[in-house]
Image (cartoon, rainbow, N blue to C red):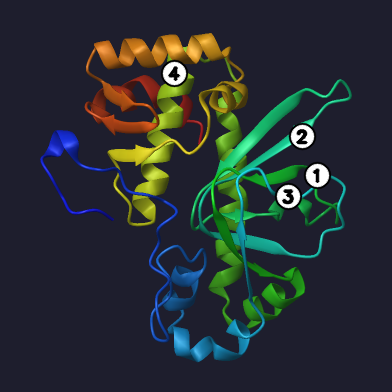
Amino acid sequence: MRASSPPSRREPHNPAAADDGDEFRFCTTCAFSQACLSQGYAKPDLTAFQALIDHVGPFKPGEYIFREGDAFNAIAAVRGGTVKTFITDVAGNEQVLGFHLPGEVIGLNAIHPERYPCNAIALDTVTLCRFSFHQLSLLAARVPNLQQQLFKLLSLDIGKASLLVGDHSADERLAAFMVLLSQRYAARGFSATRFTLTMARADIANYLRLAPETVSRILKRFRSERVIEVRQRDVQLLDPGRLEALARPVLRMI
């Protein structure tokens, strides 16, 4: 992270640059650290399980992590970077399903079919903690709160889908997307008001089921109304309260 400067010029936090912790502390983007700590297990207590975790990557931008139809063999927690999940229809059109930030898990939707139901690619430089679901189940027997954490992660994935359903306006959908990004970054120790959009605007539009021109028009209007500041992909939330009010019809369903 760069040295601080005046507020209007501060650099946004980079979700690819996370604290990996050390032999005593969990990394700041660990998806399961709270579940372990709440049961009284510090990082040294879980040394045996840590030996079973594969630290994989880096994946380069555009590189596949898994493809639709691949056999399910592991879930993975994002350590750094952003992962996009999507499907492709018979005509070759892409449908974006989600964006996964540091501390979030990919592959949970493959547990039941035992095959990955979508594709996952790196949007920037991505590193992962990957482990087999069987190994995770063994750890859950040792750390009871871990199973609850898995249910919570599954619930969050379901909740995010409410961005795509319901009779919500384009303004409400985009505001909800920004508010959720803010909350997700804040939950992992990054800035809640300054961040980088690691996904392209066309991907955001695809995810929200909006036209790219609509997203660009709304962002331009939000900027002119001093709700946000946008410089290329760097975003600053100038009026989070206004965004939250716009997003409320969507977020109340999550």
Q: Nearer the viewer, residue 134 or 103?
A: 103
Q: Which dot, 1 or 3, sits closer to the camera?
A: 1
Residue to which mark 3 is pinned: 109
Which structural element holds mark 2?
Answer: strand
User: Is residue 77 shown to the viewer in this render?
Assistant: yes
Q: Is residue 199 above or below residue 230?
A: below
Q: Is residue 101 above or below residue 229?
A: below
Q: Earlier in the sequence, mark 2 or mark 1?
A: 2
- Judge the density around disc 2: few (<14), some (14-19), many (≥20) Cα neighbours within 10 Å: some
Q: CA distance from mark 3 to mark 2?
A: 13 Å
Quarter occupied by residue 243: top left
Q: Are marks 1 and 3 in contact (CB under 8 Å)?
A: yes
Residue to which mark 4 is pinned: 172
Give coordinates of residue 7: x percent, y percent: 13, 38
Q: Which dot, 4 or 2, sits closer to the camera?
A: 2
Which structural element holds mark 4?
Answer: helix
Residue to which mark 1 is pinned: 117
